Amino acid sequence: MRQAMETADYVVVGAGSAGCVIANRLSADPTVRVILIEAGGKDSSPWIHVPVGYFKTMHNPDFDWCYQTEKDPGLNGRQLNWPRGKVLGGSSSLNGLLYVRGQREDYDRWAQMGNAGWSWSEVGPIFESLETFQRGGGEGRGTAGELQVSDPRLRREICERWIEAALSLGHAYNPDYNGPVQEGVGHFQLTVDRGRRCSSATAFLKPVRDRRNLSVVTDAHVLRVVIEGGRATGVELRRDDGSLEIVRASHEVILSAGAIGSPHILMLSGIGDGRRLREHGIEVRCDLPEVGRNLQDHLQARLVFKCHEATLNDEVRSLLNKARMGLEYALFRTGPMTMAASLVFGFMKTRPGLATPDIQFHIQPWSADSPGEGVHPFSAFTQSVCQLRPESRGTVALKSADPLTHPLIAPNYLATATDRDTVVAGIRMARQIARTEPLRSAISEEFRPVAALENDEELLDWARMNSTTIYHPTGTCRMGPDERAVVDARLRVRGIAGLRVADCSIMPEIVSGNTNAPAMMIGAKLARMVLDDRRAGVEAGGAVASRVAEVA
């Protein structure tokens, strides 16, 4: 049985990195009524707020959608786990806490592709407005935003050796890769506030939860967008007890469910490739074949090196050490429990002639097969290297018309020669740094891949068998000026009035770095556009080229 809830001006689906920002900014106008809907629960677990808690929350169905890809030809038929946050804060509540804006050129490229308003000169100030960079203001750095960005409270000798080895090879030290220039090596900046995770929910939602014009609904799975007369008028959701409800939107529905969730909801609502929707018995409301296409992700090759000296692998295997770590964190909010997924970064070029870095290093003073599965039983550290701008494109598609069934995810990794050449070049660069002092003398063995693998074909095959996602899916609701694009530059879904998408799915091309900070920027920009349109009396989707399908 369906029952109707109260009507809001704006219904936001997904309380993740973008959604929490949207809810914050829209509800700042007391005349605007906002309902924010999250499929997951509240962010009350202490493991969410302890930085190193991603070891406990990732791959945990209490907090994670626990998606899995299809068998991927580029990975020799392997399937990958794709964690995505299912909790207030979304993936910002269980990610690796790394704050990376991406390259200025990424956004200029978006604008050059015809997306007016998305150049760096236009989005840079939005990044600045969202953050308080605790080191202090610099060029383009914010000092009054809700999101707390800080330097690590932990350093380890093996990571410092890595920096010194990279410097010996001619790479420059960069104290602020989120400043004017990204290239170089140094220490990551983190979404951590005095030793605690600063998720999107912590930064943007918690401080405004008492606003009378904002309602936050948790444990509510949105099944579809309600479309009447070519307009989005609300959403249908399912509560944990199985009851169904309709939440009405008098102005707009905004999907911020992420690069997997947003296209999935659109397809379930009859917006997508009409032929495939009919195969699943779904009424076609708008024939948009690119919904779910253009999927991009950063694939990481994780090189592991055994060490002569102790690393965090050794520290966490001792119960006494664990107790000490817990006590240090409880008393001072310092130590290993404040650790992000990586301590040290490298943004580098694999070949001369490139204008900007095309690979990113994540250096970790520990090693494991994956977060959440425990560290290796020996001293080791990890060099994770990923291609920043992959050419390969995958898809998200319906597996079933049942909204509770996960969609098909086909990343299509390493499908182009450039992608294959770049991953091999990145592995070679990682080895070159590892074989340079002062890092070389700390390494006892090249463990993954073994040193005997030397030619390009062997290294590529190793990458196919061992690389994994670095958790940055994007692009599945592509923004663009052409009629095949899913959304226009104001993030309005083509052919359906009153419906927008605002999350990493709208990226026409993936950014050159981690995606949490860009997702928040997208949410803030969307909110500005919605409020501007509201003041101007512009209806979302009203001016967008339509591909509505009339189906009997």
Image: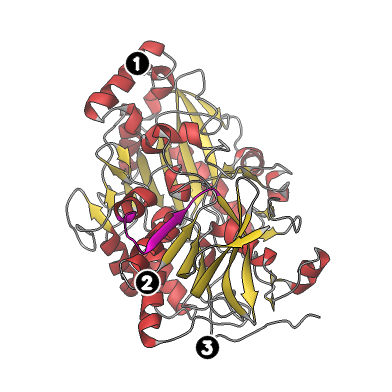
Q: Of the residues under marks 2 and 3, which one precedes in the sequence?
A: 2
Question: Where the C terminus falls, by quadrant?
Answer: bottom right
| SS at mark 3 in the image | loop
Segment tinted magenta in the rendering: 208-219
What distance separates the C-alpha of mark 1 from that of mark 2?
A: 49 Å
The disc labelled 2 sits on which kind of residue? Answer: Val
Which numbered marker is on residue 543?
Answer: 3
Question: Where the N terminus falls, by quadrant?
Answer: bottom right
Which numbered marker is on residue 339?
Answer: none
Name the residue tied to disc 1.
323
Q: Looking at the picture, tell me which residue is in the foreground, 548 or 397.
A: 548
Name the residue tied to disc 2.
32
In this rendering, position of residue 434 left or right of residue 145? right
What distance separates the C-alpha of mark 2 from that of mark 3?
A: 23 Å
Note whether residue 390 is visible: no
Q: Of the residues under marks 1 and 2, which one precedes in the sequence?
A: 2
